Amino acid sequence: MVFSSMTFLWIFLPVVLLVNYLFSFIKNQKIKMICKNVSLLLASLVFYAWGGIWYVLVMLASIIGNYLFALWVDNAAKREKKAERKAAFILSIIYNLGILFYFKYTNFFISIIESIANANFGLKEVILPIGISFFTFQAMSYVIDVYLGKVKCQKNPMLLALYISLFPQLIAGPIVKYSDIEEQLLNRKESVDKFTQGIKRFLYGLAKKVIISNVVGQVAETVFKSPVGDLSSSLAWLGLICYTIQIYFDFSGYSDMAIGLGKMFGFEFVENFNYPYMATSIRDFWRRWHISLSSWFKEYVYIPLGGNRKGKVRTYLNLFIVFLLTGIWHGANYTFLLWGVIYGIFLVIERLFLGKLLEKNKFKFLNWLYTIFVVMLLWVFFRAPDINYAFAFIGKLFNFSSGKLEIQLSIDLWQWFILFVGILFAGPAQKIFKKSYEKNKGKTWFFWLDFITQILLLLLSIMLLINNTFNPFIYFQF
């Protein structure tokens, strides 16, 4: 089930919100929170099972396994059995990565072996459960934090299950650490103000996804599914620009909806985007893009490897390892691997000398131009079906040739307009709107303008959802 579906918008969400609201009338705080948590857990399991009942079994295996490993780690720590505690921790890492490897990378490694052996083993393809990378990382972070003593071991399996499976951020993040919502699981505060903020955040996220991402995404889909030889250079650039806008509004739109849904139920989730296309370096870009994933790798990989505390060479190596793993996390394909490797190389180069040059450069527009150019080119590897297509596509961008397919055949006036709006709201317009918002947010006319805008965006989103079948979520595959 996706947030931008009629089933979710008009059946699932209203029912879950109504049940949650009815439990608010229970006077006993403890009983009230138990009822709310049980209803949210059941709703989250139904939400995840919508894509296939067997998916739930995989997630339950993750929940039960990590619950038991954390108990083991905690119990060994209390008995001061350091070796046993460390063994339990290592086994938990193997367990989580084993689940992730089997479902996400088995097909990839079998294809490599078959290619080397020039044979077809006829093995059944392993189906990838939706969002497995997200909930696996959340579960891992919980056990790691218990091992490090950052959080207390959760003895109530229902609360841990709710943390891992909570439907607003289950499938595509943001990746929420247990410490971020540990207190909220039992003592979250719900209010009319927070609920209305949640609705607003959800509606703007829905609009980003449906009105912008889906519309320009159709152009990107047409371009990237065409043979490279049929594309003109101008159409290849158009497809890449559209995909650059699509993936940002797709993922940030989902994150906005997740954060908004969390607020409706009293939760506060971490922000996941901060206008990444306004970045003036690759390092800056990764401070702004998929913030929860970057923070996860920094806290649980980069710093344990030594971070920048063991000399320059080790720092460069650590950065490279982190982004190699970031690429691998995104998918079992040479394209993602190379995508992560190249980002790692650029970050090392910026650490070596380029970062200092960018800081000294007074013409920040040139810094932005360099950053967005690199980011866009690397999106080719992210979107291309295979490595050969990616290199051929990049070649097409720079050979300035014509092709069977031209721009006028691939994009209409409405899509041009939405592409312009997408570029505008990917960053350039934010300074103007932020100043206007801060200046007028307390005024009555501004409240009603904001309210009417939300209603219009909702109506337009519904119209587009009814009339179009193109409604993918890019990050569901991770």
Image (cartoon, rainbow, N blue to C red):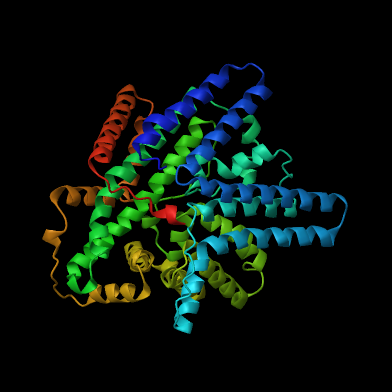
Q: What is the number of callouts on the image?
A: 0
Could one spot residue 29 in this view of the protein? yes
What residue is shown at x 24% (from left), y 36% (from top)? 463
In the image: residue 138, left or right of residue 278: right
Q: Residue furthest right?
A: 79
What residue is shown at x 66% (from left), y 50% (from top)? 142
In the image: residue 82, left or right of residue 2: right
In the image: residue 97, left or right of residue 265: right
Q: Residue furthest front?
A: 122
Q: Is residue 2 above or below residue 394?
A: above
Of 144 and 476, nearer the camera is: 476
What residue is shown at x 16% (from left), y 55% (from top)? 411
Q: Position of residue 338 (x, y in %)?
A: 44, 73
Q: Quadrant of residue 241?
A: bottom left
Of 410 and 289, nearer the camera is: 410
Q: Is residue 363 above or below residue 423?
A: below
Q: Quadrant of residue 387?
A: bottom left
Q: Residue furthest bottom?
A: 117
Q: Position of residue 88 (x, y in %)?
A: 76, 58
- Where the N terminus falls, by quadrant? top left
Q: Quadrant of residue 245?
A: bottom left
Q: Is residue 327 above or below residue 477?
A: below
Q: Position of residue 121 (x, y in %)?
A: 48, 75
Could one spot residue 306 in this view of the protein? no
Of 52 and 176, nearer the camera is: 52
What residue is shown at x 85% (from left), y 49% (from top)? 78
Q: Position of residue 126 (x, y in %)?
A: 49, 62
